[in-house]
Image (cartoon, rainbow, N blue to C red):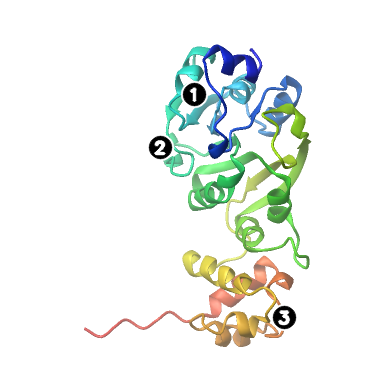
Amino acid sequence: MSSPGELLRRHGLRPKKEWGQNFLGDAGVLADLARLARAGPGDVIVELGAGLGHFTRALAATGAQVVAVERDRELVPVLRDELPPGVEVVEADAKSFDLETIGRRAIVCGNLPYHLSSPILFHLLDQREAVKRAVLLLQREVAERIAAPPGGRDYGLLSVLVQHVAEAEIAIDVPRHLFTPPPEVESCALVLEFLETPRAPVRDERRFRALVKAAFGLRRKTLWNALKNFPGGREALKKAGIDAQRRAETLSVAEFASIERQIQPRPPEAA
């Protein structure tokens, strides 16, 4: 397959900077990324943001069924021209693509636009029952935050929410000079292995997400201060046996879940 630069010139296109388009064409690195998917015949891979199709080809070489999702209307015809038969090209937005339409748990892969990585990650969390594994090329700083253990400044909202439902591991560094155009940041592959059940039970997942967000919203404050406006937060801290003078970054996923379970549901409003 031609290099990203050659493909762009052939089709009279330029990377859209405002869309965060940085195309990766190194065959060796792409093969390494595809191996991380641990896919084969019988698997379905959904690639979010297929771009010019270089990663798509590497994924198709695994023998898995590949669904290439791309929102750029100028790139969709390129994908249909360049990709091998059997790859399904879907014009859709990665932030809203319905993974449940696949019909079975998919392996999700993608070279994600860095400014959209968080919305796409939250979308994956919302649909996690439809995802078996994810291999995502991300800004290294974002990947380090997701995989960070408790106790450091990298540990935050994304760390807790992702690790609640998945094992997160940084796998491969990808030098910036391999991209067209080169990004201004370092990149790496993050592998998420989604768990059959969450790491710790919670009563209400939306409330759990809101609780963790509130706790990290004032991360320099103690939990007592950070949760003062969260309904039932302070009382739940006491019932869970969590020291209210601790800060959010010191709590494990299980400790956050234990606080959420102690929050009493609101009584129904009177008719």
Q: State the residue at coordinates (58%, 15%).
A: 9
Q: In which quarter of the image is residue 265?
A: bottom left
- Horizontal relation, residue 91 to residue 135: left or right: left
Q: Residue 30: x percent and y percent?
A: 70, 26
Name the residue that disc number 3 marks: 246
- Horizontal relation, residue 85 to residue 41: left or right: left
Q: Nearer the viewer, residue 144 or 185?
A: 185
Callout 2 secondary element: helix
Callout 3 secondary element: loop
Amino acid on which the number 3 mark rests in the picture? Arg
Q: Residue 122: x percent and y percent?
A: 53, 52
Name the residue that disc number 1 marks: 75
**N-terminal label among 2 and 1:** 1
**N-terminal label among 2 and 3:** 2
**N-terminal label among 1 and 3:** 1
Q: Is residue 84 visible?
A: no
Q: Can residue 56 be seen in this view?
A: yes
- Horizontal relation, residue 196 to residue 73: left or right: right
Tag shown at residue 191? none
Which of the two discs, 1 and 3, sits closer to the camera?
1
Q: State the residue at coordinates (67%, 29%).
A: 181
Sort mark 3 into few (<14), some (14-19) or many (20+) by Cα contacts within 10 Å. Answer: few
Name the residue that disc number 2 marks: 101
Image position of 250 with respect to 114: above or below: below
Q: How many angstroms separate mark 2 from mark 3 (CA)?
A: 43 Å
Callout 1 secondary element: loop
- Horizontal relation, residue 140 to residue 10: left or right: right
